[in-house]
């Protein structure tokens, strides 16, 4: 089962979410409106994201869609 790690730093209003282990060789790219995509620098695979200026009723989290699997690797539904 996959684990998601969520870190919230209220003093700087920063929410960080990792669905894979953080890497020493990770890179960050701002997507839009203070949403930062965190990727493995070697594979370019998304491993997490950050929301800048996050607050508990922030609507931006509902706007983020990250495809982290491949359809071929999912079991067939019958």
Image (tube, helix red, strand yellow):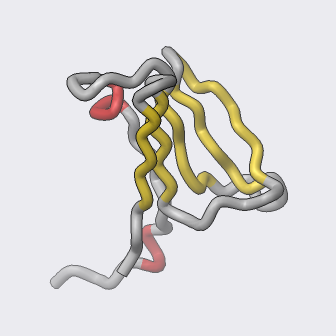
Query: Is residue 1 rendered to the left or right of residue 43?
Result: left
Q: How many marks?
A: 0
Q: Residue 59: x, y in percent?
A: 26, 23
Q: Residue 67: x, y in percent?
A: 46, 53
Foreground pick, 59 / 24: 24
Q: Residue furthest top?
A: 33
Which residue lies at the image location 40% right of the left edge and 74% below the top edge?
2
- The C terminus, quarter of image: bottom left
Foreground pick, 9 / 16: 9
Foreground pick, 22 / 38: 22
Image vertical order of residue 15 relative to residue 1, above or below: above
Query: Is residue 63 rendered to the left or right of residue 50?
Result: left
- The N terminus, quarter of image: bottom left
Which residue lies at the image location 41% right of the left edge and 29% below the top edge?
10
Image vertical order of residue 74 relative to residue 31, above or below: below
Q: In which quarter of the image is residue 42?
A: bottom right
Q: In which quarter of the image is residue 37?
A: top right
Query: Is residue 13 rendered to the left or right of residue 28?
Result: left
Image vertical order of residue 71 relative to residue 59, above or below: below
Which residue lies at the image location 58% right of the left edge and 32% below the top edge?
36
Which residue lies at the image location 55% right of the left edge and 65% below the top edge?
20
Q: Residue 58: x, y in percent?
A: 28, 23
Q: Residue furthest front?
A: 11
């Amino acid at each position: 089962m996959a684990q998601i790690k969520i870190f919230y730093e209220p003093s700087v209003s920063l929410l960080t979410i990792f669905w894979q282990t953080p890497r020493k060789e990770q890179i960050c790219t701002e997507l839009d409106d203070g949403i930062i995509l965190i990727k493995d620098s070697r594979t370019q695979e998304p491993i997490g994201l950050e929301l800048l200026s996050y607050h508990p009723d922030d609507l931006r989290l509902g706007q983020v869609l990250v495809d982290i699997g491949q359809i071929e690797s999912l079991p067939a539904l019958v």
